[in-house]
Amino acid sequence: MTDIGLKPQDAFSKLPWKRIGKQGIRRLSSLAAVVALAGCAVVPKPNRGVAPPPPPKGPDVVSPLPTDTSRHRVALLVPMSGTNAGVGRSIANATTMALFDTRTERVRITTYDTAAAGGVAAAVRKALAEGNRLILGPLTADDVRAAAPQARAAGVPMLSFSNDVTAAAPGTFLMGYIPAQSVERVVGYARERGATNFAALVPKGIYGERAGSTFLSAVRAKGGTVVAMESFDRSPGSIAAAVKRLSGASSYDALLIADLGRVAVQAAPLVRADGGAKARLLGTELWNTDSTITASPAMRGAWFASVSDTLYKQFSTKYRARYQTAPYRLASLGYDAVLLTVRVADTWKPGSPFPASRLTAPDGFAGLDGVFRFRPDGIAERALEVSEVGSGAVSIVDPAPRGFGK
């Protein structure tokens, strides 16, 4: 367990963490300035390079945390050991950076290792016993489901980092990037620019099933026609066979490849050579961190939808300088969760229950990943941008909205 109650000792500018309303554009600009001045449901693969510093070691806590009447107790539940320790440490580091950047004295964050003895159940039990009134995390959907009953019984909300919509429940909010929103955004953009006949390649498994279902409904809702949809198991032979089956269908002018960028790179040349020479390739948020897509000539002109990377790139630069390694992309969820907490802390009395009703404010909030808000079902709705793959680079062709209903 790591306890962090930061004082404003670093020379970071104060972050104007506000809801997005009429002054949304100004506040988003302020957020960009802060990140720059500061030095700026798939778990991703680890980044190469120097490993981040290990969590502090010490004896287990045998007594409750000291009484704190001026700061809010917030628990961070992430894996600090085991298979996903790299992701957990990256998120934990990001929450520390957010505390420094906001210069807050109103929030104390204590980290609990969900991979330690007893797992997430023991971690959440300890977090609740020590008086935490809000939980950031856990990371995976299984851990969210395991932690939710205890947290709900204690009246403590969870802002989890999962993107599995089936894990959302009363008092359990999901900050993860939802694949369906990415599919809807890129399909809508393609339809607005003249695409009529759509096809899709989706991987076998839960992700592919959900992406395929969303694809069908999104195309029909926009007045397009689905001419074919094929599944594959990610082996080269299976991908080639799926593309071959597509060539036997009616011609298509847009093709969604709902999988990782490296899979799209494998499929694109086959598509170009076998019936889809002029089709516009479409992708999801899974392409966002894959630089290999810009090296493939067959991928040129492809569109994909994801959260904005503008502020994240500045954050990543600052993170590298502090921890001598690159952050996991999910680290921004930890940073934004702290920003949200600090904003609510302005009117949240220490020791009182967290005002969860404020999370579903219709105007939403702003963070490293852009504007987001929680729907009544607890799922984060995000403003996404559409990018186009070029030679060696990706460019934004349709920026993310700066607010909702705009």
Image: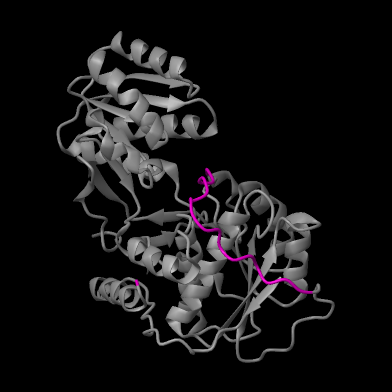
Q: Please give the name of the residue rendered at 33% of the width and 71% of the height, measured from the top-left corner.
A: 20
Name the side, left or right, on which 240 lies relative to 274.
right
Quadrant occupied by the C terminus: bottom left
- The reply to whether residue 362 is in sight is no
Q: Please give the name of the residue rendered at 37% of the width and 36% of the height, measured from the top-left corner.
A: 261
Task: State the extent of the magenta-drawn residues as a range.
Answer: 40-58
In the rendered view, tell whether residue 98 sits above or below residue 124.
Answer: below
In the rendered view, tell whether residue 222 sits above or below residue 9.
Answer: above
Quadrant occupied by the N terminus: bottom right
Residue furthest front in the image: 50
Name the side, left or right, on which 288 lies relative to 302.
right
| Front residue of 74 and 40 | 40
In the rendered view, tell whether residue 236 sits above or below residue 13.
Answer: above
Prevailing secondary structure class for the magenta stretch in the rendered image = loop
Residue 242 point in image, percent of width and height = 40, 15
Residue 347 point in image, percent of width and height = 50, 85
Residue 80 point in image, percent of width and height = 66, 60
